[in-house]
Image (cartoon, rainbow, N blue to C red):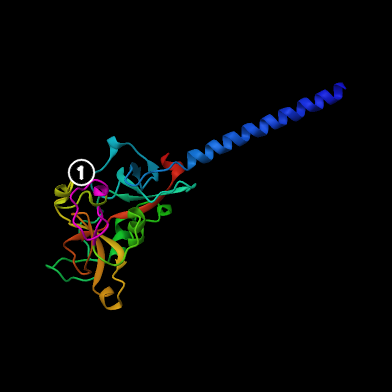
Amino acid sequence: MKKNIILIFIFVLLLTGCNDNKKNEEKKVVDDTTYYKDGSVIYFNPETNKKCDSSEVESTGNSGCLRWYAINDEETGKKELTMILDHNTSLKSAYTGSEELDGVSASSVNKQLKLDTKKWNKNLNARVITVEDIEKILDIKFEQKSLYLETKNQTKPTSYENYNWLYNNTKGCTSYKCEKEDTETLGYWTSNTMMNNEQATIYAWVIKYDGSLVYEKKFLASRYGIRPVIDVSKNIIK
């Protein structure tokens, strides 16, 4: 009888220990997959691959502590967070590699992106925002037509409240409720050209200072810049 009681006691202890481990594991999973709403501000240093403090932030450039916005997170256990920088690393760059406007020497978007982010941690997979990213942010199906982010169509907005963070730090953007404007650049390139084969050789999509997604000629080097997007482990920024 005594032996049976001891065995039962040991069995209860084992069950209790297993339940405690399970609770700790569940808590860790929850912590690792914190959900970030689109536009949530995060301070992060892409060179050290570490979270940083707002007091350390560099408002321009591509090094040190930088300000980012969360985009396209999910509430279903996503381990990495996609973020877009709040300013351009290169103020002016053409989409293509040519010297076609006002004597401005331009490099391609991808080449300039590599130059701008060459000191960043390689695990961040720096890239340029895609139209597909914007589709997901706006929760729409993009139909290859210019649109305003706020209305998600060609109707000009009467207010600018939901997506002004996407065109922050562009020339003239304070008229459209951004926090701070830049003195040089009107917006930034996406990675997408027009879908039509003939138009694709001429036009690419850009985000502009007035909160619009429009197509522009790919050789325009004096108007648009590079704004990197990265993927960061949530363990680093939690």
Q: Secondary structure at mark 1?
A: loop
The three-letter code of the residue at mark 1 reads Glu
Residue 38 locus on image (x, y percent): 34, 47
Query: What is the number of callouts on the image?
Result: 1
Helix, strand or loop: magenta stretch? loop
**80 to the left or right of 165:** right
- Identity of the residue drawn at 26% across and 55% down: 149
**Front in this rendered view, residue 68 or 167:** 167
**127 to the left or right of 17:** left
Residue furthest to the top in view is: 2
Residue 192: image quadrant is bottom left
Residue furthest to the bottom in view is: 198
Of the 4 image quadrants, the one containing the N terminus is: top right
Crowding near the residue tagged with mark 1, few <14, some 14–19, many ≥20 C-alpha atoms within 10 Å: few
Residue 130 locus on image (x, y percent): 34, 61
**Front in this rendered view, residue 130 or 37:** 37
Residue 69 locus on image (x, y percent): 32, 46
Magenta-span inclusion, residue 158: yes
Residue 226 locus on image (x, y percent): 26, 58
- Identity of the residue drawn at 86% across and 21% down: 2
Q: Is residue 181 above or below residue 9?
A: below
